[in-house]
Each structure stands twice: as C-alpha cells, then as structure tokens.
Amino acid sequence: MGIIVQKFGGTSVADPNKIHNVANAVIKEKENGNDVVVVVSAMGHTTDYLIKLAKEVTKNPDSREMDMLLSTGEQVSIALLAMAIQSHGYKAISMNGQQVGIITECIHSKARIVDIKTEKLHKYIKEGNIIVVAGFQGVTPDGEITTLGRGGSDTSAVAIAAALNAERCDIYTDVEGVYATDPRIVPNIQKADVISYEEMLELARVGANVLHPRSVETAKQFNVPLRVRSSFKLDNLGTLIIGVENMEIYKPVAGVASDCSQVRILLSNLPDIPGTAAKVFGALAKNNISVDMIIQSLASNGTNSIAFTVNEEDLESAIDILDEVKQEVKAGEILIDKEIAKVSIVGAGMVDRPGIAADMFRSLAENNINIKMISTSEIKISCLVEKSNAKSAIKALCKEFELEAKEIAVVKGDLPDV
Ligand code: ASP
Ligand code: MG
C-alpha cells in the first residue's frame, strides 16, 4: 500500500456533477488499497474570471493582491471536493497551501516551491483521510500567500508526490494521454504509452500544452513516475512519463510540436568584429528577454547578419533595446518577421541514429515547405517555417516518422491549457 497523488484540473471540477465524478475516481483509488492525496485546480474558468475582475478594478493590479485573489479559486474547489468525498461515506479533509506548509520563494505570481512540510499530511493520512490539497498556491516563510504561475497545480501535485515519496502522480485531464502531436491537427495521431521526462520537457517547450513544464522538471529531478490520464475514462491508463534510462526506445521520434508565438528579428550589415553579438544579446539578456534560435551569417561584402527569434510578447521591448544597440554596434536595418512558426521533432531515440535531420528536411521539401532557420539539441530538431505552412509541416512530419495511428484520437472538450 503506497501513496498515490492525483491531480484534477479545472475542467474536471467545473460543476457539482463533475466534482462527484472526481470523488468517485478518488474513492476508486482508495478502494485499491492506496492512501490518496488529491490536488485540484480552481473550478472551470474561475482563475480567468478572477483575473478579469481584477483588471476591471484596476489596469495594473498589485501582484501580492493578485495572489491573494487567485488563491481563493482553489480554496473553493478543495472544500467542495472534500464534501463530495465525505458524502460518499469516506473520511476527507481539505487543506490550503498554507495549512500543508507548501513553502515558496517570495515572488508573487510565479513562485517556486522550495519545501513541503509533510507532518500534517502524514498525520491525516494515518487517521484514514483522503486529503484534498489546493493546487497552484503556497506560502512564503513570512506567511505571504503566493501562486506558482498559470497551470501551476500540476507542479503542486508533483512536488507533493516527491515530498511524500509517493508511488505515482496521476494527472487527470481532458485527453487520454500524451499524443505525438495535437489531435486537432492530426486526428489519427498515436498516443504514447510511455514517454521520457526529457521528451516531455522538449515537447512542452515547443508548444505541447499537456503539462506545466515545471511539473515535468520536478518529476525528473525526484524521479516521480507521472501518469497523464483521462478523467472521463478511468480505466484507461493514459501515458506514463518516466526516466529515459528506464525506457525501451523503438522509434527515433516521439512527437512533433509547433510554436506560433515567436517572431524573427534580423539585424543586417553588422561589422564582422569581436564583441558585436555579445553586445546585442547582452543588452537583450539584461532586460530579461530570452532568445531562442540564432543564426549568424557572413555576406560576401564582409558584413554579418544575425537573425534570431524572441517570444512575440517581448517584441516591443526587444525593438526598443535594439534601436539603442543599433547605433553602438553600427548595424544596418532591423527587420521583423511575424509570420513564422517553429516546428520541432522530438525523440530520445534520435541520439544514435544519423539521418533523422535529413529525413525531416526532405519531408518538408517534398511538401514544398521552405525552411528559414534550423536549430538542434540532443533530442530535438526545430525548423522555422512560414506560419501558413505550420499545419502541413506537422502532418508531413507525423507521416514521415510514422506517428499516425489506425484510430482517431478521442478528445473531450477543450485541450488542456497551461
Ligand atoms: N487555476 C490555476 C490556473 O488556471 C492553476 C491551474 O489550473 O493549474 O492557471
Ligand atoms: Mg489549469
């Protein structure tokens, strides 16, 4: 008999009926002989609603007060779920982040968990309770309420599983598991039965929105087996996420993802002297702007051009900064391309297999898709393409790397958003 941590997202607890469904899933796990700790998000779109409310009061709400406000969402759902479980005749108790002792750094709206106290959790488990914990929130050592960033309940659940040395952390959601790509683009896409933390992290970084990326990092760090499974089909085991060292890998590519939220910036006619790139990227870094893909190329006239991508949210500040740096580094023009998408293939199995990049480029070429930039990491190859080509690129790559299944993926409601 071990401890299982279950996490249910906002759509799974959106109304009283659904809360009873969740109660049934929790009780089922308890009846299997396990101790159960359940982590829940706020009901339905509560968090969005609370944010909207704050913005109606003031354009620029204080971040401490935002955390005070947003943490109430989860407090509603834990109480209701505990009541629902009790109504089925089981012992249950709800706890908010402060009551558990989910200690975070003092950074409002995107705090990181630094410690989780387990005394009370163990005490209540021992007394036979199912514990229902508020996701997404914590408390600083000084008693200030914090939140972990949108979608943070996944991370709460994994961190609690790690602290309790749980057997497994099950993330229940609207989809049946982790798909090799978005089933809205390729309806007959394969579901992975097993995928590695490393692949999941890469997929999350390039746009697969199944799990909060920090939850996967935490699971990897503490080796917590994670299961993504459907809250509507409780018998379906979904996708198990574990360390790559424990996997048998048959396929080079586990998934294809796209990210349409980047823009490309090109700086032309830069002098080919030491320190130019350092100045450009140093100025961006100083202003907290992350840069993703970078290409520098030398033209026949002896000048360099540097193209790179940033998140579209950072575009305006990036342009302001570059306008200043431009004088200093004596750059020519700054050109912006917003109509781009980054399409990536990810797979731990590509490590010792040469030719995967060539297969990717050929497949795009056969579909008449031009590649604007390329970047690679150990288990990922990304190509920047025209935004209008993103979907056909994904379809082509799923076919190329045999990620299509015979049956159509079943997706209920909206895909989870993080
Ligand atoms: N309720 C929070 C949000 O909507 C946390 C979560 O759902 O994981 O972002
Ligand atoms: Mg959520």
Image (cartoon, helix red, strand yellow):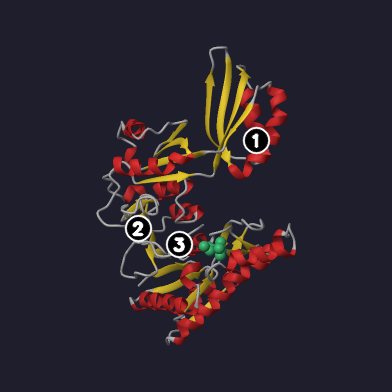
Tag 1–tag 3 contact (CB < 8 Å): no
> Seen in the image, is 98 located left or right of residue 142?
left
> Residue, x 70% and y 36% (percent of image)?
320
**How far apart, in angstroms, are the residues tagged by discs 1 and 3?**
36 Å
Q: Nearer the viewer, residue 350 or 364?
A: 364
Residue 342: give its label. Answer: none
Q: Nearer the viewer, residue 132 or 261?
A: 261
Disc 1 marks a residue whose amino acid type is Leu
Q: Which residue is mark 3?
A: 414
Question: How crowded is the residue under tag 1: few (<14 C-alpha within 10 Å), some, or many (20+)?
Answer: many
Question: How crowded is the residue under tag 2: few (<14 C-alpha within 10 Å), some, or many (20+)?
Answer: many
Q: Residue furthest top?
A: 301
The quarter of the image holding the N terminus is bottom left
Residue 240: give its label. Answer: 2
> Seen in the image, is 310 located left or right of residue 401?
right
Q: In terms of sequence position, does the residue under pointer 1 or pointer 3 come before the other? A: 1
Q: In this view of the protein, can residue 248 be seen by the observer? A: yes
Disc 2 marks a residue whose amino acid type is Leu
Image coords of residue 376 (percent x, y): 43, 34
Q: In terms of sequence position, does the residue under pointer 2 or pointer 3 come before the other? A: 2
Q: Quadrant of residue 302?
A: top right
Q: Which residue is mark 1?
A: 284
Mark 1 secondary-structure assignment: helix
**How far apart, in angstroms, are the residues tagged by discs 2 and 3?**
22 Å
> Residue, x 46% and y 64% (percent of image)?
161
